[in-house]
Image: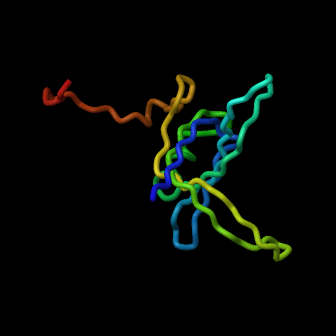
């Protein structure tokens, strides 16, 4: 069996970083993905994504509302009860990998965040 999702879209809001009771980072964000359209009507799907640990921190650090993103992961469903005790089902993409897409989607790094590599003559390029 195979469960793989690949999405390319834009973040609808800034990612939210939280920490579980065990101290594990988790980030939830939504990606707007355009659908093929006809008759001039543009449509989009809004897909909820969940990233854990280092990926969660990476997404929150380098992505923000409106930025393009490529997400690779798997689709998972979970059930829960809302505040009125109604059973609900959530469908989410659990993130395995994220990538920058497009020229404007690259991170806004400050000079002090870039690690400089010293050339000692052993670099392969």
Figure check: 114 above or below 15: above
Instruction: Spot the residue most to the left.
Output: 121
Quadrant assignment, res 35: top right
Quadrant assignment, res 116: top left
Figure check: 62 above or below 84: above
Q: Is residue 5 left or right of residue 80?
A: left
Q: Can you say which quadrant of the picture contains the C terminus?
A: top left
Residue 111: horizontal and vertical position, in percent? Answer: 45, 30
Return the residue nearer the eye: 105 or 122: 105
Residue 107: horizontal and vertical position, in percent? Answer: 52, 32
Identify the residue shown where x is 50% and y is 34%. 100
Identify the residue shown where x is 82% and y is 77%. 85
Question: What's the image's color scheme?
Answer: rainbow
Return the residue nearer the eye: 39 or 58: 39
Q: Is residue 75 left or right of residue 83?
A: left
Identify the residue shown where x is 49% and y is 31%. 110
Q: Can you say which quadrant of the picture contains the N terminus?
A: bottom left
Residue 64: horizontal and vertical position, in percent? Answer: 63, 39
């Amino acid at each position: 069996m195979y469960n793989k999702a690949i999405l390319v879209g834009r973040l609808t809001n800034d990612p939210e970083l939280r920490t579980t009771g065990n101290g594990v980072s988790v980030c939830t964000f939504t990606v707007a993905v355009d659908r093929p359209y006809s008759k001039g009507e543009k449509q989009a799907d809004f897909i909820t994504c969940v990233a854990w640990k280092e990926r969660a921190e990476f997404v929150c650090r380098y992505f923000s509302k409106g930025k393009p993103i490529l997400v690779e992961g798997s689709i998972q469903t979970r059930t829960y009860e809302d505040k009125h005790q109604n059973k609900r089902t959530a469908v989410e993409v659990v993130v395995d990998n994220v990538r920058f897409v497009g020229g404007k989607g690259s991170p806004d790094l400050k000079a002090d965040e870039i690690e400089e590599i010293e050339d000692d003559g052993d670099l392969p390029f």
